[in-house]
Image (cartoon, rainbow, N blue to C red):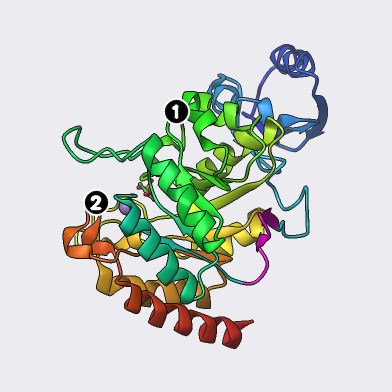
Amino acid sequence: MICILKPGVTKDKQEQLIKWLKSQNLGVHISEGETHCVLGLIGDTSKVDGDLLESLEIVEAVRRVSEPYKTCSRQFHPDKSVIDVSGVRVGEGLTVIAGPCSVESEEQIITVAKEIKKAGADILRGGAFKPRTSPYSFQGLKGEGLKLLSLAKKETGLPIVTELMDIDHIDLFDDVDIIQIGARNMQNYELLKELGHVDKPILLKRGLANTIEELLMSAEYIMAGGNERVILCERGIRTFERATRNTLDLSIIPVLREKTHLPIIIDPSHATGKANLVPPMALAAVAAGTDGVMVEVHNDPLHALCDGAQSLKPEQFADLARRMMIIREVVS
Ligand code: PEP
Ligand code: MN
């Protein structure tokens, strides 16, 4: 981190600031220029409040040289991470996750699980605890939904991913292979800290209005607690555009690739909100080098209790899965 002082700062004030910085366990490298004095801060600057420093009367500007995150940074870990999910290696090749928005019944989840398995999916998704905008909407089958997911896992052998909203529910998640943290909880820091002590991979979705750096800082919360098995997921961000449910930020793939070693999954279903837009965006994500795609699939989208409009029918998913593999071959 570099701290540029305003021209004409007195030696006294400069020394006071240096003393304060050193009291925070930082080394200070002083470089006196013709007009400006520049302080190079050495050591662990991840805990330094750059805004506070910049607000001081004698400081002109503060620039971070190293990123505020460490364990998820690619500088820290140059090789890409591969996360083993009950035998599925996320971060190696293309991982395909599919399934309904919500688990609704035994017949529904078993039918969808078998169909997506046949089409080549690697992991089954399905919400049991649902974060809904309206308290009057279907809230999920909760514990019963988790039991049905376990049944589908037993029937098909597919690992399962499902959302956790409250750490008090963790005991119900024993059979779950990946814990999903939804967009709305990306900055629920107490929850993230708890996940740092959980021995399961976490699928962390980007918040509706969060920057890439904020997503990485949230991953850092989990990793700082000791759980380094974090998978990042882009699911669209909120912009002024109304033609799609959200705006899918595909540039996140090459950006994250530079910044972090963690695997990246793209969710074109929540990003677009419309089934006809899902295949082209899923294919684009594969072409851009994503590690995986998560797609909502329902056996009867018209009667789905949640997100029917963006759900593919099993046969549409099978066609997409086939085309994604072709694109993957071409670009790899
Ligand atoms: C989901 O995947 O079921 C979901 C609710 O997604 P998001 O948190 O991205 O809205
Ligand atoms: Mn959904």
- The picture quadrant where one finds residue 131 is top left
Residue at x 65%, y 24% (from the top left corner): 8
283 up-or-down from 188: above or below: below
Q: Residues within 10 Å of mark 2 (few under 14, many from 20)?
A: many
Residue nearer the viewer, 53 or 156: 156
Residue nearer the viewer, 36 or 275: 275
Q: Earlier in the sequence, mark 1 or mark 2?
A: 1
Say the numbered circle drawn on residue 71.
Answer: none
Q: Which residue is mark 2?
A: 306
Q: Amino acid at mark 1?
A: Asp
Q: Amino acid at mark 2?
A: Cys
> Residue 188: horizontal and vertical position, in percent?
46, 29
Give the Cα distance between marks 1 and 2: 20 Å
Is residue 61 on the magenta stretch?
no
> Which secondary structure, mark 1?
loop
- The picture quadrant where one finds residue 303 is bottom left
Left or right of 127 in this view: 186: right
> Over which residues does the magenta segment extend?
83-93
Residue at x 28%, y 66% (from the top left corner): 299
Disc 2 beta carbon < 8 A from ligand 2?
Answer: yes
> Which secondary structure, mark 2?
loop
76 up-or-down from 247: above or below: above
Residue at x 26%, y 74% (from the top left corner): 276
> Residue 179: horizontal and vertical position, in percent?
53, 43
Q: Which residue is mark 1?
A: 166
Answer whether residue 268 is visible to the viewer in this image. no
Residue nearer the viewer, 164 or 176: 176
2 up-or-down from 78: above or below: above
Q: Can you say which quadrant of the picture contains the C terminus?
A: bottom right
Q: Can you say which quadrant of the picture contains the N terminus?
A: top right
> Residue 90: horizontal and vertical position, in percent?
63, 60
> Residue 29: horizontal and vertical position, in percent?
83, 31
